[in-house]
Image (cartoon, rainbow, N blue to C red):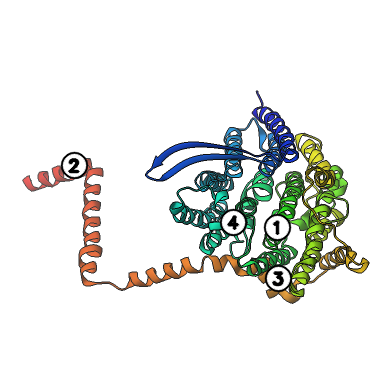
Amino acid sequence: MFNKYLMWFFNLLVLSVFCFYLGLYFMYMNFCLFLEYNLICINSLNFYYVLIFDFKSLLFVSVVLFISSMVILYSSFYMGYMSISSNRFLYLVLLFIFSMFLMIMSPNLISILLGWDGLGLVSYCLVIYYSSLSSNLSGMITCLTNRLGDIGILICISWMMSFGGWNFIFYNFYFNNNIFILMVLSSFTKSAQIPFSCWLPAAMAAPTPVSSLVHSSTLVTAGVYLLIRFFDNLIMFNYLFVLMGLFTMIFSSFCANYEFDLKKIIAFSTLSQLGLMMASIFLGFIDYSFFHMLTHAMFKSLLFLCSGIFIYFYSDNQDIRFLGGCCNFLPLTSCCFNISNMALCGIPFLSGFYSKDLIIEISLFTGFNLIIIMLFYFSLGLTCCYSFRLIYYSLVSNFNFSPLNCTKNEFSFMGVSVLVMSLLSIIFGCSFNWLINLDLNWIFLPLTIKILSLLLVFLGLWFGFELNSFNYLKILDYYFFNSSMWFMLGYSMFLTNSFFNLFLNCYKILFWGEFYLTLNMYEYLFKISTFFQLYLNNTISIFMISYLLWFLFLL
């Protein structure tokens, strides 16, 4: 049988390499290509479909295409290319990649909305891929939360009609605060910032390759990329949005330290890094945020791919308390899993170090107060804490699963994808830093402050080790509070539940016309229809009984 997965893997890989070299060429030549196609003109409004090719869009597209190619190669074994639903899964992933391409390459709000809505709809279809009650509920939460961001973009489109066009790169100096707030709202919903964070852990009901592509490096970074592309100079409400990004980091790190679901822990770590990107954008470090977005995409996709192998080999089990001894049964995957976790912590000379450590150190030179700096470093320690907790439960602790669990061959298409991604998780940060040559600043710090990040990394590792022997029964309420995302899902559904209860109570108050004309009429019609249904189903019996009664009457 022809393997479509391998064909699309090769095509996307070639496109990724081509876009990467084209992006480097555009950057070195300081060149930008702007393509505009006039669809229709209504009065003074011109509806254009616009594509922009510059180094940021091309490099981001190359990273998205490369991760997509690795995920499709991984899925050819994980999802089974010969299964009945394999074509449906492949086409959904390709539709998602196409929607992501439309969103990245568009500097026009109309064309951005096309890709933005496509991302939301295709991600909903991928979340409910495994049809079950929990998957449907997760898909509903994901879809409805992302629709809030669509509302913000739609209002901005109507607001910009007075400009005569929607090419926002030409109108940066004419925007008022309302358009800025609406675009930040759209970005916060797509990138799952507080108070819209509950949809990302719920979306882990999707297959693991979907989580690796959609919920780690592409869909959730769409909001970050929109702010990078939309505003060159963020000058309004910076302090408030920096605090929201930092609170998202700390909130997600606390929740990850009290979670036992493998995929949800990685989802919380994605939330933490998204908060770091948002905070760096509102501090004014847009290039650093873009750099961290690309490096984070590499090692976070690797983390999801390794977790998928663990889930596959442990018979669909996602509880980390049963995943002990992975280094004995899956040595290659365990090594790659450790690489991605250490890159997430910002261990020196891995990919995450070159972007994450840079953002934290450059934040020392901002005009914000000491609280902002303390929150940055505190979130760094919490990241190392839950990362080492995850390593301990899955790799170091004893084997806690069923002894009858059958072992499988580790090296397959999944192993090839994981090896390539782990190689890039090691070298991508430094090599990309040398290649893109962004306007980075020299940072001179005292030795005590310079080693503060490294000290907090080791302190986080120690606290993560101590959490493994912690008795949660003594603080059960605190554990439930953190493992349920600070009851954020209840807050998100509070308004809906309030209106639902209001209408339930109104239903009990009956008007006399409603009583006689609706409820009683319904009962009468129901009885009449039941009588005729019995009559039609028993015509022969009724005929025989009538004949018998007539015969008895004659006697």
Sequence-first disc among 3 and 1: 1
Distance between mark 4 and mark 3 Cα atoms: 30 Å
Q: Nearer the viewer, residue 457 or 479?
A: 457
Instruction: Give the amino acid type for the residue marked by disc 2 in the picture.
Output: Met
Residue under circle 3? 479
Query: Mark number for residue 544?
Result: 2
Left-right relation of 340 to 196: right
SS class of the residue under badge 2?
helix
Q: Nearer the viewer, mark 1 or mark 2?
A: 1
Sequence-first disc among 1 and 4: 4
Instruction: Give the amino acid type for the residue marked by disc 3 in the picture.
Output: Tyr
Relative image position of residue 107 (x, y in whole percent): 57, 45
Query: Mark number for residue 112?
Result: none
Say few, some or many: other residues with alpha carbon within 10 Å of mark 4 (under 14 / 14 to 19 / 20 or more).
Answer: many
Can see residue 162?
A: yes
Residue under circle 4? 187
Residue under circle 1? 277
Relative image position of residue 528 (x, y in whole percent): 21, 54
Relative image position of residue 116 (x, y in whole percent): 55, 47
Relative image position of residue 188 (x, y in whole percent): 60, 59
Most extreme residue toward the right is 447
SS class of the residue under badge 3?
helix
Say few, some or many: other residues with alpha carbon within 10 Å of mark 3 (under 14 / 14 to 19 / 20 or more).
Answer: some
Most extreme residue toward the bottom is 474
Distance between mark 3 and mark 1 Cα atoms: 28 Å
Q: Nearer the viewer, residue 68 or 487?
A: 68
Sequence-first disc among 4 and 2: 4
Q: For the point 52% across and 43% down, which residue is it? A: 111
Sequence-first disc among 4 and 3: 4
Instruction: Give the amino acid type for the residue marked by disc 4 in the picture.
Output: Ser
Instruction: Give the amino acid type for the residue marked by disc 1 in the picture.
Output: Met
